[in-house]
Image: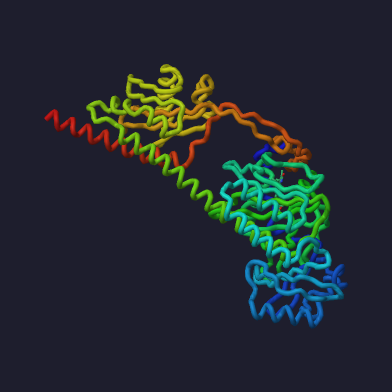
Amino acid sequence: QPASITDQIANCEREPIRTPGAIQPHGFLLALDPALKVLQVSDNLARFIGLAPEQALGQPLAAIIGGEAAEVLAWVMEEGGLRERPSYLATVRCNGSEFDVLGHAWDQLAMLEFEPIADHSGAGLQQLYPLVGDFLNKISDTDSIVELCRLAAVDIRAMTGFGRVMVYSFDEDGHGNVLAECLANGYDSYLGQRFPASDIPRQARELYVANRVRMIQHADYTPAQLVPAENPLSGQPNDLSFAALRSVSPVHLQYMRNMGTMASMSVSLVVKGRLWGLISCHHAEPRPLSFHQRTVCEQLGQILALHLKNRNDSDELQFRLEVRRAMVRVLGGLTQGADFIDNLRSVLPELLHFARAGGVAIVVDERLITFGDTPSNAQIQDLTAWLATNRHDDLFHSAHLSARYAAAADYTACASGLLAMPISRIHQHYLLWFRPEHVYHIDWAGRPDGKQSTNGMLSPRTSFAAWRETVHGASAPWREAELELALEFRGALLGIALERAEQMADLAE
Ligand code: BLA
């Protein structure tokens, strides 16, 4: 029996990406104890150093990489100490080749990663620093998010020479939308396309918040296994979360090959602790990139994220101010008459404007007042009866009402979206706002349901050809700020109604 799609996604989420037990083979790894004795090695050591793992294990560092290199590294580690994130220790020469050495402390081990520098291509530090400076200057004059992202894509491409650099952001459902890109000749455009959430499982997103850059140099590599397979100090598989050479999930390597991408780097864009998006770089051929290049890209990503946050904060603030102003106009326009409903009737246009709605209805017992574009009176009565039986908290909102309440399919044109607010604590009295349908297209990068399943495992799709989905029955979304202010408005309204009732009672005495 084939596994359900939910089970298959759960399988993806079980990919042990932090503990693969192996590294990418373009460099080698040594795990040392505090006395710099070698406790674990990657099994590709021979290719770089000419030693089999058995010859290296238990030896002092100097016996593996030579006295001079070991002395430099020991000195740097003693001076600076190792941190939990890899830092550049030194460039050392061993066995006739030069290596950039990164070090980090993890799982009681000193993890040293050696990357041969002969491989590295692209800009050096002399070119990289001015590019970051330029980027800082340019983005200060930019206030559109898309333009910010475009400038980042252009500069990352200049820094790395990748054939395709994309900046994409995740929506609430985790789908990625390509906002900007910069391409070399011969690379297809993905601009404006959407990538389904299942392309990047949850545990990978979590890791990418902590570890902000990852490089896959060759999507067709054979992993270099760690020997022994487990950390001898803990008896557990090594946590390689922060190792630059961490071997990546075979599922993802298949995805890259399906896409025609032989090398990739992605840089996390973290805004307020959340993975806002990624800068994703592709190359059709394998491509090495030095630690310095990756670090500069990581920093550029941080600068971009900071600007995105500022941009977002000021947009949000502006929006809240506007909604609040609209709310004040409603409250200020309420007349002071004895009948609460008549008072509300006097501010119908302001009510409409407050919720950026196309229609509004006030439902009080048998009385029904509508304004703008709304369903029929009978339909509204049915809708409020449904609302009443489906107990909701202080507010009910939907930007796709017919998915929750089938009868609404008859009036999606005027009421694809609904915001319903009970305005009495005892009676079924409601203020209803309706938003019209907003038909839109999603250009998927490959059909989202086009994934293949092999032995119950979801595999990456094989086609990334654009596929257009047209979405009906949805309205513009209700924003967090609108819902919050609607609640505030409700509090004010109930307060006013109560006050009025008390005045009436006083008069009656
Ligand atoms: C990881 N998937 C990733 C990563 C990206 C994507 C960027 C991070 C690794 C990297 O930097 O290359 C996906 N790449 C994309 C997307 C774009 C892109 C969306 O360029 C858009 C432009 N993938 C699948 C399926 C599964 C899956 C079906 O399609 C699960 C069965 C898994 N993707 C998967 C896993 C990882 C991953 C497990 C983590 C890889 C790792 O870090 O070890």
| Residue 88: image location, x then y, percent | 70, 70
Most foreground residue, 166 or 424: 166
State the count of labels: 0
Quadrant housing the N terminus: top right
Most foreground residue, 434 or 425: 434
| Residue 380: image location, x then y, percent | 42, 21
Residue 385 visible (yes or no): no
Q: Residue at point 66% right, 68% down?
A: 234
| Residue 363: image location, x then y, percent | 36, 24
Quadrant housing residue 396: top left
Q: Residue at point 80% right, 57% down?
A: 287
Most foreground residue, 240 or 149: 149
Rendered position, 194 above or below 163: above
Q: Residue at point 66% right, 80% down?
A: 78
Rendered position, 205 above or below 197: below
Tell me how the rendering is colored.
rainbow
Most foreground residue, 248 or 8: 248
| Side of 215 where 143 appears, left or right | left
| Residue 71: image location, x then y, percent | 75, 82
| Side of 258 where 132 appears, left or right | left
Residue at the left extreme, as displayed: 509
Q: Residue at point 11% right, 30% down?
A: 509
Quadrant housing residue 350: top left
Residue 217 visible (yes or no): yes
